[in-house]
Image: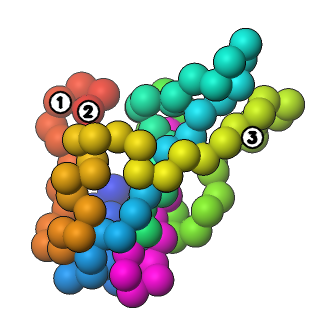
Amino acid sequence: MNKVAVIQKVFGKCMGATLVGYSTAEIFFDQWEPLNDLPIRLVFDNGQIIAVAWSKFDDLWLSNDLSLPFDIYDSQIRWVENAIEDINQLLGGVILSVSLGQGYLEV
């Protein structure tokens, strides 16, 4: 399935829905450290969830559940809710459209 079709399928039920929360992953090395480049889970007022991650280098992965496209093996992962100030500004906003960035390694 091409990227446009995947975006339409995953985000389709969220068009017009309000973003009510999100969570980002942290991994434990010697201390908890954020994985700043994804994964992220978006939660909407209509009950929909969108998970966004990389399944391998530069391969965007989208899902409507809490799964991940990779195995965390023995790593410890925790999910932190609403922890990025730039994203917090979007809480309460409505999804009107979705697009992919055009730059290299950029979404």
Q: Amino acid at mark 2?
A: Glu
Evaluate if marks 2 and 1 touch, with contact meaning CB atoms under 8 Å apart: yes
Compute the Cα span from label 2 to label 1: 5 Å
Ranked by sequence position, the earlier of labels 2 and 3 is 3
Q: Which residue is mark 3?
A: 71
Q: Which residue is mark 1?
A: 103
**Which of the two marks, 1 or 3, is nearer to us in this view?**
3
Q: Which residue is mark 2?
A: 106
Query: Going 18% across and 41% down the picture, which residue do you hit?
Result: 101
The span shown in magenta is 44-55
Looking at the rendered structure, the secondary structure element under dot 2 is loop
Res 103 quadrant in image: top left
Q: Position of residue 17 (x, y in %)?
A: 27, 81
Compute the Cα span from label 1 to label 3: 28 Å
Task: Reply above or below: 75 against 46.
Answer: above
Is residue 37 one of those drawn in magenta?
no
Looking at the rendered structure, the secondary structure element under dot 1 is loop
Q: Number of numbered discs present?
A: 3
Query: Going 65% across and 58% down the picture, which residue do you hit?
Result: 67
- Number of other residues with Cα within 10 Å of mark 2, as a class: few under 14, some 14 to 19, many 20 or more: few
